[in-house]
Image (cartoon, rainbow, N blue to C red):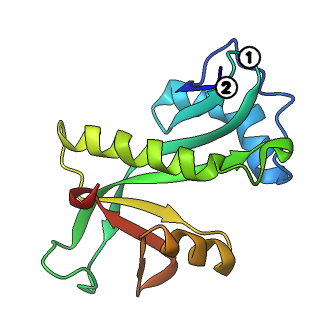
Amino acid sequence: MLKIQPLNKQHDKQSFDCGNASINHYLQHLASQHCKKGIAQVHALTDGVTIQAFYTLSAISLDNTQGAIKGYPKQIPAVLIGRLGVAIGEQGKGLANQLISHAMHQAKSISTMAGVAFVAIDAKTETLAEYYAKLGFIRLVSNPLRLVYPVSQI
């Protein structure tokens, strides 16, 4: 049975392949270090050993100095869905949607303990930006590949 859980030593990071060398390298070589240092938390969809998909969460401050997000201060606390990868054999099965939903609910939970106004996600391509927009994320005028979703709407 697949379950989303924090990355741990039992997870086989080395055999993960999502088809993107940068995402693979992150999981295989940097993810554990980032977790230990508090840079990001990695959440893996796994059967206990094999990682089918994963995403990272980090705290960020959105730059609102141009006032693009009306009614908010110049710096806005947010949670960033950072890297996200789905194993090649699992792509097209809705796992990315499942991970994004899980991440958003994690952000909502965090918002009950600390100030978090938005969930942010950085699209690597225009196609991904369009995909995130269909999920309800809003593009920032100052950076059209960064999209946000109000935590209050989760």
Residue type, mark 2 in image: Thr
- Counting other residues with Cα less than 10 Å from the Cα at mark 1, is it few (<14), some (14-19), or many (20 or more)? some
Label ID, residue 39? none
Q: Position of residue 101 (x, y in %)?
A: 46, 48
Give how far across and how far down residue 144 sits, in percent: 50, 83
CA gap between label 2 and label 1 equals 6 Å
Residue, x 65% and y 20% (percent of image)?
Answer: 1
Task: Please identify the quadrant where the C terminus is shown.
Answer: bottom left
The answer to which image quadrant residue 125 occupies is bottom right
Disc 1 residue type? Answer: Val
- Residue 134 image offset from top left, x and y in percent: 51, 74
The reply to whether residue 92 is in sight is: yes
Local crowd at mark 2 within 10 Å, few (<14), some, or many (≥20)? many
CB atoms of marks 2 and 1 within 8 Å? yes
Residue 81 sits above or below residue 30 on the image: below
Q: Residue at x 24, y 67 (%)?
A: 75
Q: Quadrant of residue 112?
A: top left
Q: Please state which of residues 113 and 25 is positioned toward the viewer in this rendering.
A: 113
Q: Is residue 92 above or below residue 76?
A: above
Residue 35: x and y in percent read 53, 29
Q: Provide the secondary structure element on which disc 2 rests.
A: strand
Q: Nearer the viewer, residue 53 or 110?
A: 53
Is disc 1 placed on a helix, strand or loop?
A: loop
Image-quadrant location for residue 10: top right
User: Would you say residue 58 is visible in this rendering?
Assistant: no
Residues 149 and 94: in front is 94
Which residue corresponds to mark 1?
Answer: 49
Q: Which residue is mark 2?
A: 46
Residue at the spot x=61%, y=17% of the render? 8
Q: Residue furthest left?
A: 71
